[in-house]
Image (spheres, rainbow, N blue to C red):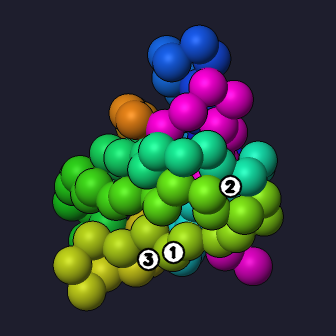
Amino acid sequence: RLATAVNTGGVWITSVISPGIELASDLEVRADTTLGATNVSLTIGLTTEADEDVNTGMSITANTAEGTATPITYGVLSRFIDLRTLAASGGTNGDELSIWVTV
């Protein structure tokens, strides 16, 4: 697990655990709980294989089932060497998400 995001009382608490990824890897967002009735918007700061820092946005749909994985992409790129930042908004109290290297 490279990062977590937890909605507590309408406030998102995020933590990036990643010290860098050894090999360029596909990443995914996983729903750690079944999400509530509001979409979750994520902004994710990544480093590409070309060592370029980029930010990508994505939305995780309301009512997404626990365990659902959504690939992270930036345009046509899907492999990254670092996860730098994570910010979340929207969602419902109790929503939990995490970012993992795809296996």
The first of marks 2 and 3 along the sequence is 2
Q: For this rendering, which residue is in front, 83 or 59? A: 59
Q: Taking 50 as reference, is 62 above or below it?
A: above
Residue type, numbered disc 3: Arg
Q: Taking 26 as reference, is 55 above or below it?
A: above
Residue type, numbered disc 1: Pro
When asked about the image quadrant of residue 29, the answer is bottom right
When asked about the image quadrant of residue 74, the answer is bottom left
- Residue 17 percent across, percent down from the top left: 63, 34
Q: Residue 31 carries which label?
A: 2
Would you say residue 99 sits in the magenta stretch? Answer: yes
Marks 1 and 2, how far apart at CA: 12 Å
Tell me the residue at 38%/33% (across/down). 89
Q: Report whether residue 92 is seen.
A: yes
- Residue 27 percent across, percent down from the top left: 55, 68
Could you tell me how many numbered marks the image carries? 3
Mark 2 or 3, closer to the camera: 2
Query: What residue does disc 1 label?
Result: 71
Task: Tell me the crowding category of disc 3: few under 14, some 14 to 19, or many 20 or more residues within 10 angstroms, Cα based.
Answer: many
Residue type, numbered disc 2: Ala
When asked about the image quadrant of residue 57, the answer is bottom left
Q: Taking 26 as reference, is 86 above or below it?
A: above
The magenta segment is 91-103
Would you say residue 31 sits in the magenta stretch? Answer: no
